[in-house]
Amino acid sequence: TSQEVSQVRIDYHAALLALQEHGTRMVCTGKMHTDRICRFDYLCYCSEAEEFVFFHSNVSVMLPNLGPRRFQPALLDLSSVEDHNAQYFNFLELPAAALKFMPKPVFVPDVALILNRFNPDNLMHIFHDDLLPIFYTMQQYSDLNDEARLVFMEGWAEGPYFDLYRLLSSKQPLLKEHLKNFGKLMCFTKSYVGLSKMTTWYQYGFVQPQGPKANILVSGNEIRQFASTMKERLNVTQEHHAEDNEYIVVFSRSVNRLILNEPELILELAQEFRMKVVTVSLDEQTFASIVQVVSGASMLVSMHGAQLVTAMFLPRGATVVELFPYAVKPDQYTPYKTLASLPGMDLHYVAWRNHKEENTVAHPDRPWEQGGISHLDKDEQERILASQEVPRHLCCRNPEWLFRIYQDTRVDIPSLIQLLRENLKTRPVLRRNKPVSTVHPGRVREPKCQTSVQAANEAKLTVSWQMPWNLKYLKVREVKYEVWIQEQGENTYMPYILPHQNYTFSENIKPFTTYLVWVRCIFNKSLLGPFADVLLCRT
Ligand code: UDP
């Protein structure tokens, strides 16, 4: 790799002079270590000390300049997993004058994105924690283009899916272990450190039990655009599937968490839906070929597990069927449900759970990380075996959780088919949906009120407005307006949904009273526009 890098020509002496004179420059975004990404000129890395180094000169810049708060607890998160203490980034400081006494630095000419992968052995983690955040961090900074150099500092080896990371840039990503090949001191000419968390939708349960993130900021649109770029780079062709050529995919695991009656399940699904059923498995085929199959499927059926992250490649309108082993409560483990349910993913999601203990095969004698419990006290083993549901727990080594989630399951097919029928009744799931519009209304224009007093206790309030400016360019199925009326000084208001651009209120309107009136537009029942400036209306 050092050979590869040295092929890109940089003026070594100019770079060394710049480092010696200017030192390191850092400018970051974000108020907190959890939302910070930093851009550096001449950030260096000392492979002997395994530390990044910031060289101070009298013109170096460090923004934010946190002083010792830089260590409370860290400057930033190197991975997209929030505030994980094994993923913190910081640097050592040295005066630029110290360079005279140090080994000659090797310069990396490419613009680098420096980060930690969170768990590159697991497909869900790979997509959710690494690939999507890298992809959108690169879109945030224009010099992180196709030529950018990804640098993975978590210290792991390539892992089984390194080819997926290679798709993000034309340059070979660097691992931490590669850095020592560059010599004792290497300096990144330009680099970004940290990852955007904007696209993550799940928290894994380090401080509270796992679940969807509290404030999800990504929609199906961004997930699908990422998925479609990945498809292109994997050379997956966009086939048009005819209505009569629909099929179901059973994503099987062949090592653990097995479906014990898979052939029977496949047969029954085929019969029920009058469709072809194909199986895929990460243990038996390439990732690209799986994406090819999934991206044309009407339904994806799988045990709970990382392979279900491939649901992001399903066409709109398809159904995800997630199967849960005995004693595992589906609504407590929802990374794939949350993905499928993101607005604009347009997927239908169904969770099935094995309720019959006789249909489960547990593995108490396996190693603990595969769900074995024989290392536990007899009492604890018996309690786990007698329990009918895993209680809520934190990540990641809860033995009862591991024991239950690594069970194999004989799927009770009638109950699964019944569940699917119930869900398909309410929605025509096996039809390809077109993306629905997400264009929000603008403000209503020229809001006005007129008032009149009819009698000592009778008054009228007429509110009128013009439609939002963007409506004339849109085809909207249903346009409605919402009006809120509040008597000045009160703390409640009356909301009204109205079909036209004016309305006269007479009920509950008192003479010689001031009302505050807000008006906004709503498209198709759920796309809310902003309120116009409040009207002050005196009867
Ligand atoms: N995996 C697989 N086949 C198996 C078991 C696991 O392909 O029989 C994959 C799985 O999809 C994931 C990785 O191996 O990418 C780790 O699986 P693990 O059971 O540890 O995690 P989980 O699927 O529960 O997230």
Image (cartoon, helix red, strand yellow):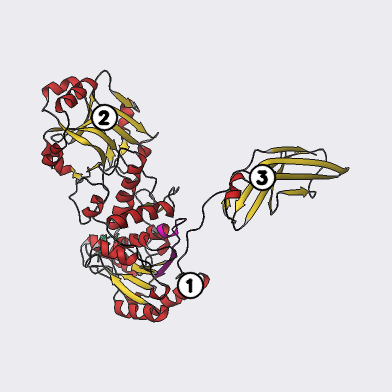
Determine the CA span between mark 1 and mark 2: 56 Å
* Image-based side of 532 in relation to 71, left or right: right
Please give the residue where the numbered disc 3 appears in the rendered image: 519
The tag earlier along the polypeptide, 3 or 2, is 2
Residue 431: x, y in percent? 46, 69
Please give the residue where the numbered disc 2 appears in the rendered image: 41
Q: Is 350 one of the magenta-colored residues?
A: yes
Q: Quadrant of the N terminus?
A: top left
Q: Which numbered tag is attached to residue 424? A: 1
* Residue density around tag 1, few if under 14, some if 14–19, many if 20 or more, within 10 Å: some
Please give the name of the residue rendered at 26% of the width and 29% of the height, measured from the top-left corner.
41
* Image-based side of 464 in relation to 305, left or right: right
Q: Is 111 one of the magenta-colored residues?
A: no
38 relative to 156, above or below? above
Mark 2 secondary-structure assignment: strand
Magenta residue span: 339-352
Please give the name of the residue rendered at 25% of the width and 26% of the height, measured from the top-left corner.
24
Observer able to see residue 49: yes
